[in-house]
Image (spheres, helix red, strand yellow):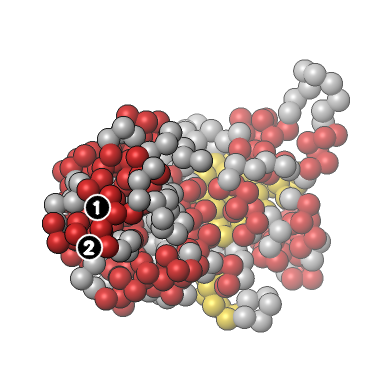
Amino acid sequence: MHLFGRSETMDRGTADQGSLLGAVDEEKEASFANAPPSLAETADLALRNAKVREMLQAFREEGPEALSRYVDDPSNSAALDVLRGQAGMLPAPPLAPELLAPPTATAAARDPSLPLVSAAPLGTDLLTPASPPTVGRDAIAAAAPVVAESLGNPRVREMLEAFRAEGPDALRRFAADAECAAVVARLRGVSVGAPAPAPAPARVVGRRPRVLLGATGSVATVKVPKLALALSEVADVRVVVTEKAKTFLAKAEAYDAAAWATFQASGIEVLSDADEWDAWQEIGDDVVHVELRKWADLLVIAPLSANSLAKLANGLCDDLLSCTARAWDFDKPFVVAPAMNTAMWTHPLTATHLADLRVLGVAAVPPASKKLACGDVGPGALADVPAIVAAAGAALGEAW
């Protein structure tokens, strides 16, 4: 079913697609009449049409509702079909305002083990929440020749054809190629360049900041006592653990007996799902996740497992921590520190989910690369405690 009404390309054969895309290249139009176009050729031609670029800019500024104004225009309708994987082509990813962080400038600067998010060091754009793009029409128009030029690169064409044949998983093989990453970003409507300026950080004046530390079902939860203690030196801290996180928190004493003993004696409150339900008996009683949202100046989820990352990115909220995150006031900062197996970290969905959080203003502390608890070696380990504390301080405008 077409999301915005039936388009003309749904009722015409592939022989008419070249004209519907408003192609300015007559030779390519002629080739369209004889064979279905590749994704590369279609994208090239579509981006040359000023009306298509105007539609993409409207989508970026206003969201999906803007597309309804353009479905009656054949060139725009056909472009939507192609980018959604219709009009006789294999599925393509849907348009979204920001699915990828700006790629690194060169292939050499990019770690092939990382997903398609910025591989910037701590303190740069991974700690800078991305604001919704506001690139002007001229910038959108400028994207067309960049993409067209990139299509001369055999590696880019290989990536696009692999995507058509295999789907999104094929993009993992091209993550280390800066030009391939840039093309994917351009086609999804993301400006390739410097990150958008971060909004002024929230500052707490006249009292200690209040940090809500969340922990999810990652083995790295054994480090939560040490992290909570470090944060408690500069802020008031409360901890929320998921049911799966409790399994690993119970092993924290064996991991670091000294930190566990100090944590137990500190009086830092640890909350879980039972506290949410036990506190509520009747209408009018406090709702714990709402009260936590009001209390905290900053939400830090460390470690953030692959499962909980997916839940946050998709708005799922079935426990105390995810309900708190779903109710979060995004005028206040939110920091996550992912921790997961290397195969999970490099999975394409991880990049997509982190990018979805970045659009909301969530900052991410990248994981460390080392030997993991499972024995694998690679990125995915929870960042060091000082790095997470520094990121939390930066989110509040403090030098912790």
Q: Are marks 1 and 2 in contact (CB under 8 Å)?
A: yes
Amino acid found under the numbered disc labelled 2 = Ser
Which numbered disc flags the more N-terminal residue, 1 or 2? 1
Amino acid found under the numbered disc labelled 1 = Gly
Q: Is residue 334 above or below residue 389?
A: above
Q: Return the x and y of residue 288 as percentages of the image width and height.
A: 73, 33
Q: Would you say residue 14 is visible in this rendering?
A: yes
Q: Return the x and y of residue 192 as percentages of the image width and height.
A: 27, 56
From the viewer's perspective, tell me whether residue 294 is left or right of residue 23: right
Q: Return the x and y of residue 37 as percentages of the image width and height.
A: 30, 61
Within-10-Å neighbours for mark 2: few <14, some 14–19, many 20+: few
For image coordinates 24% across by 73% down, the residue present is: 153
Q: Nearer the viewer, residue 149 or 107?
A: 149
- The numbered disc on residue 5 is none
Q: Secondary structure at mark 1?
A: helix
Q: Which residue of the protein is positioned furthest toward the top in this rendering?
A: 284
Q: Would you say residue 209 is visible in this rendering?
A: no
From the viewer's perspective, tell me whether residue 285 is left or right of residue 311: right
Q: Which residue is mark 2?
A: 31
Q: Which residue is mark 1?
A: 18
Q: Nearer the viewer, residue 194 or 214?
A: 194
Q: Is residue 70 above or below residue 400?
A: above
For image coordinates 35% across by 46% down, the residue present is: 12
